[in-house]
Image (cartoon, helix red, strand yellow):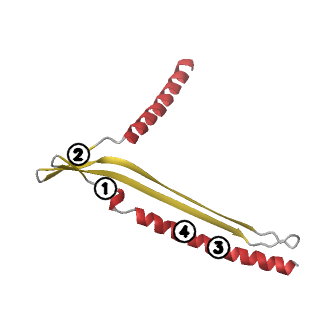
């Protein structure tokens, strides 16, 4: 019975390790399909002789992991294993291209996320300054 259990566990490990490689390849393929110019430039909109093409920036990221401790225990045949992965994308508007009378001009728009970063940095700096002042006054 122990030989059968060891064989089954070994086969399961081999199947799982091959599956992880296939998942990473599939994920990379899917991300690659989405990472073209169409992810940055929107569909042109035309009205009254003016064509507008939205422009943005897209950031992609993903990662994965794996693990294996193939030490078999003679008592219960236990084998440790693990895996994991994740990914994400972030899109932000940059501006638009305006085409009018045969001339093209890029017009930048503000990124709302940059304001959030400035507010958070200002809050952190204020906290540090106020904390320092508190120590000086009490000190």
Q: Earlier in the sequence, mark 4 or mark 3?
A: 3
Q: Which residue is mark 4?
A: 24
> Badge 3: few (under 14), some or many (20 or more) residues near its Cα, within 10 Å?
some
The quarter of the rendered structure image containing the C terminus is top right
Q: Earlier in the sequence, mark 3 or mark 2?
A: 3
137 or 14, nearer to the observer = 14
Instruction: Report the residue that reaches farthest toward the front.
Output: 48
Q: Which residue is mark 3?
A: 17
105 or 130, nearer to the observer = 105
Mark 4 → mark 3, Cα distance in angstroms: 11 Å
**Residue at (42% x, 39% y) in the render:** 117
Label ID, residue 41? 1
The quarter of the rendered structure image containing the N terminus is bottom right
Q: Earlier in the sequence, mark 2 or mark 1?
A: 1
Mark 3 → mark 2, Cα distance in angstroms: 50 Å
Q: Residue 38: x, y in percent?
A: 34, 59
Label 2 sits on a secondary structure element that is strand
Q: Earlier in the sequence, mark 3 or mark 1?
A: 3
Mark 2 → mark 1, Cα distance in angstroms: 14 Å
Residue 135 vertical placement versus 109 (above, below): above
Q: Is residue 63 left or right of residue 48?
A: right
Instruction: Report the residue that reaches farthest toward the left.
Output: 101
Label 3 sits on a secondary structure element that is helix
Q: Residue 23: x, y in percent?
A: 57, 69
40 or 62, nearer to the observer = 40
> Badge 2: few (under 14), some or many (20 or more) residues near its Cα, within 10 Å?
few
Q: Is residue 126 left or right of residue 68?
A: left
């Amino acid at each position: 019975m122990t030989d059968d259990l060891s064989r089954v566990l070994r086969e399961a490990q081999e199947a799982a390790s091959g599956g992880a490689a296939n998942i990473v390849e599939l994920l990379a393929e899917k991300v690659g399909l989405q990472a073209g110019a169409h992810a940055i430039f929107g569909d042109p909109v035309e009205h009254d002789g003016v064509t507008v093409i939205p422009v943005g920036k897209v950031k992609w990221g993903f990662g994965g992991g794996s693990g294996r401790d193939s030490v078999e225990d003679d008592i219960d045949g236990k084998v440790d294993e693990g895996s994991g992965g994740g990914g994400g994308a972030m899109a932000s508007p940059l501006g638009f291209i305006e085409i009018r009378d045969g001339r093209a001009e890029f017009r930048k728009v503000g990124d709302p996320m940059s304001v959030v970063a400035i507010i958070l940095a200002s809050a952190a700096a204020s906290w540090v300054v106020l904390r320092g002042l508190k120590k000086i006054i009490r000190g």
